Image: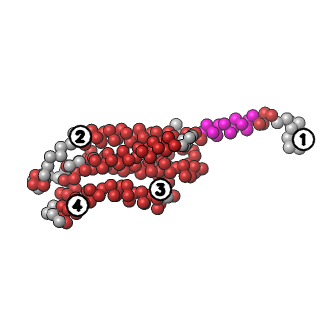
Amino acid sequence: MKNIWQLSTKPFEVISENKLIFFTWFLFTILAGQIGVISNFIIRVINGNLSFSQSLFLDSINGSFYTYSIALLASVLGPLFVNLIENHPTKFKSIKILTIIVSIFTLFFAGVFYSSSPNDINIEKLKNLTYNIDWWQLTFLLLSIIISVYSFSVIRLENNYDKYKELDDNFASKDDAKVDEMNNKTEDLKTDSKGNKI
């Protein structure tokens, strides 16, 4: 198998090649996906009587970041599966399948943690609580963003195949086939280009 570090990091190079596309995708997928948290902030902080940290803490207690993580991971799976189904032969198949597997397991565990988190707090109880960071929720939030950015990058590897072909699992077999073909041609040669016998 390819170098794990290279498989993990090299796809992110696509972002620098597609800055406008990535910015547009990031704006509407990652940032706009947090519109609920942003609107809650506006309602609670600007029009209400809560601080920014209290508003974020309340969203955290309600599981808003778990919900966002689950939705983001679920939205990653569609484009990856469609890409696998549509393209024959599929380029970068191993990376896509591994991304799907990691996404599904992360989605599953985010759902388990979300279903086991308490969410029965109101604003009056909030004022008497001490603020703690829900590390699991933060972990799933960051992990879902990283996985979605990675899947964005993996799908776009095909746009510059020559640059990233060493990441493709089909590349090695294609390269071996070319070497075998060249070996077969050299065995058939009986004379050189000047007509001398070999």
- Circle 3: is it few (<14), some (14-19), or many (20+) Cα within 10 Å? some
The kind of secondary structure the magenta stretch mainly shows is helix
Q: Circle 4: is it few (<14), some (14-19), or many (20+) Cα within 10 Å?
A: many
Q: CA distance from mark 3 to mark 2?
A: 34 Å
| Sequence-earlier tag: 3 or 4 | 3
Cα gap from disc 3 to disc 1, whole angstroms: 53 Å
Q: Residues within 10 Å of mark 2 (few under 14, many from 20)?
A: few
Q: Nearer the viewer, mark 3 or mark 4?
A: 4
Which of the numbered marks, if any, corresponds to residue 115?
Answer: 2
Instruction: Say which quarter of the image contains residue 109.
Output: top left
Picture coordinates of residue 33, whole percent (x, y): 33, 55
Q: CA distance from mark 3 to mark 4?
A: 30 Å
Q: How many marks?
A: 4
Label 4 or label 1, whichever comes before in sequence order = 4
Residue of label 4: 41
Numbered label attached to residue 15: 3
Separation of disc 4 and disc 1 at Cα? 83 Å
In the image, what residue occupies the spot 23% across and 40% down? 115
Please name the amino acid that badge 2 sits on: Ser
- Camera-nearest label, 3 or 2: 2
Relative to 44, is 186 on the left or the right? Answer: right
Residue type of the residue flagged with mark 4: Phe
Identify the residue at horizontal 48%, vertical 48% (top origin).
154
Residue shown at 14%/46% (left/top)?
120
Q: Looking at the image, can residue 20 be seen?
A: yes
